Image (cartoon, grey):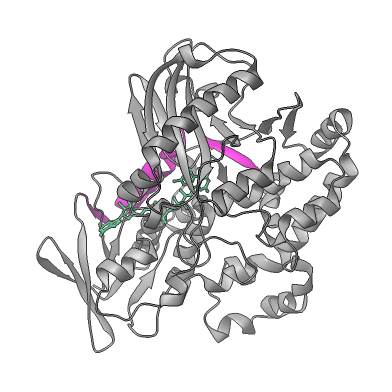
Amino acid sequence: MRKAIIIGAGIAGIASAIRMAVKGYSVEVFESNPYAGGKLSEINIQGFRFDAGPSLFTMPQYVDELFTLAGKNPKDYFEYEKLDEICRYFYEDGLKLTAYADVTKFGAELAEKTNSNAAEVDSFLAKSKIIYAVTHKVFLERTLHKVKSYLHWDTLKSVFRFGNIDAFRTQNKANESFFKDRRIVQLFNRYATYNGSNPYQAPATLNVIPHFEYHFGAFLPKKGMYSITLALVKLAEDVGVKFDFNQKVDAIDYQNKKIKGILVGGKFVAADTVISNLDIWFTYKTLLKNLPPPTKLLNQERSSSALIFYWGIKNIHPDLDLHNILFASSYETEFDTIWKEKSIPHDPTIYINITSKHIKNDAPEGCENWFVMINVPANNGQEWDQLIKEARQNIIEKINRILKKDISEDIICEEILDPRSIEFKTGSYQGSLYGNSSNNQFAAFLRHPNFISKISGLYFCGGSVHPGGGIPLALLSAKIIGDEIG
Ligand code: FAD
């Protein structure tokens, strides 16, 4: 029986394992942590449960597909609900908006409370739909690195429509042309941060992202985001995958341009196929030390990182829902501070995710689990301890200002994740959340391919390689590998 080894049990590693097992391989996953999921894991403190990383679930069809592929019913493993409210937005000038999944309702909300209207949203989302139609087969679902990808009829059709993907102006410029109200420009600029980029530099092609939410929907697994990991691990085990935790792989072994296996804990384990789920930077720097690295590609600017406070909160805060954004008064200043000064803005945009609004067991009675996150630069050795202290104070003051109440006494327990601990816990170079940034129009072509011609039998999956970061794209990297292996 052919053997496949997967290095890393992040979401793409687990998905790759399932795909290889379904193909008839004997599959073993080596994971350095004592648990699966990588960034998609959870934290439990004093009766509060938090999803550690991702909080927004889009494109669940890519998860469901894995169950179907294995001949199983996804509902036997985990369930999720479609959200009626995508997000609540709060502005320093007192404006509060609810982004309803129902676009007509969202348009009416804008018309009632802002200088924008339903027609603006409609034409923006029509453009998002076109970008999706042109890009998804070419940029998301296939490798960009083989001629055969360009020979499909749908790819050729897309190539002729490339002019429609809005790659030659920034996302902010495009959004200014769609929306009269600058606060709505800000709302849609925020989508650049979904892959750790800067809307004042990233191409307007990123306006494809709202299509995921407003067309396909925003979802929440009924037992939280971490249940996606647990469900996929269970599925993997059901199709015969073996997981080895606390096993940090030391090297990938190859000879005569052909994969031989891996070295782990001083032992050699043979395999016909090795799939690395590590950040591509660490794959080259630690596992493939003798192979000349693709330096230009590895030196691309990294995506942003995050500073997260996991707060157990006493009291219920009815103004807030599952997803909440408290916007910075100047978005441009915020991004300049992150990207040019490589520091933490004084007035950051704050994201508060509260799963206990929907999942009662995530917090004790009368309490809430607040996941409070701001975007910060990737780790370049900043004075993080001092920056975090100042940021914590600024965040609390901003929340107090916007919610018009003092929440500082409500925080009954706390854990903090910052770029250093993200790098340490998930092996993400510089703690960036999504691999390289997409701050230029060529970024899609500068992500590492899912394979290399130098070593046959070696593949790469996960958020730092093609097609990109975030759960849906990480899952697609596994799908592309599956299709390549045939
Ligand atoms: P990773 O999660 O990066 O896991 C890699 C695994 O490899 C880890 O388990 C690590 O321990 C293991 N490993 C590393 N080195 C070794 C070694 N030598 N040997 C063995 N194992 C090793 N995405 C969304 O879709 N929606 C969101 O709302 C969202 N929000 C996010 C918020 C935060 C705070 C973070 C951190 C990420 C967020 N993301 C979000 C991004 C998403 O989490 C990632 O893109 C995705 O989970 C990456 O998965 P991956 O397969 O690349 O593996």
| Depth order, front residue of 409/49 | 409
Residue numbers of the magenta segment: 217-245
Residue under the image location 32 percent in, 78 percent down: 457
Residue under the image location 69 percent in, 35 percent down: 329
Q: Is residue 225 magenta?
A: yes
Residue under the image location 70 percent in, 51 percent down: 211
**Looking at the image, residue 91 lies above or below residue 230:** above
> Number of labelled discs?
0
State the residue lying farthest toward the left. 266
Q: Is residue 321 magenta?
A: no
The answer to which quarter of the image holds residue 152 is bottom right
The answer to which quarter of the image holds residue 384 is top left
Quarter of the N terminus within the rendering: bottom left
Left/right placement of residue 274 relative to residue 56 reads: left
User: Residue 166 at x, y = what percent?
Assistant: 76, 65
User: Would residue 191 be visible to someone looking at this image?
Assistant: yes
Quarter of the C terminus within the rendering: bottom left
Residue under the image location 65 percent in, 22 percent down: 402
**Looking at the image, residue 327 lies above or below residue 165:** above
Left/right placement of residue 118 relative to residue 415 reads: right
User: Residue 150 at x, y = what percent?
Assistant: 62, 82
User: Residue 476 at x, y = what percent?
Assistant: 51, 61
| Depth order, front residue of 338/12 | 338
User: Residue 220 at x, y = what percent?
Assistant: 55, 36
**Looking at the image, residue 282 lies above or below residue 101:** below
User: Would residue 486 be visible to someone looking at this image?
Assistant: no
**Looking at the image, residue 99 lies above or below residue 419:** above
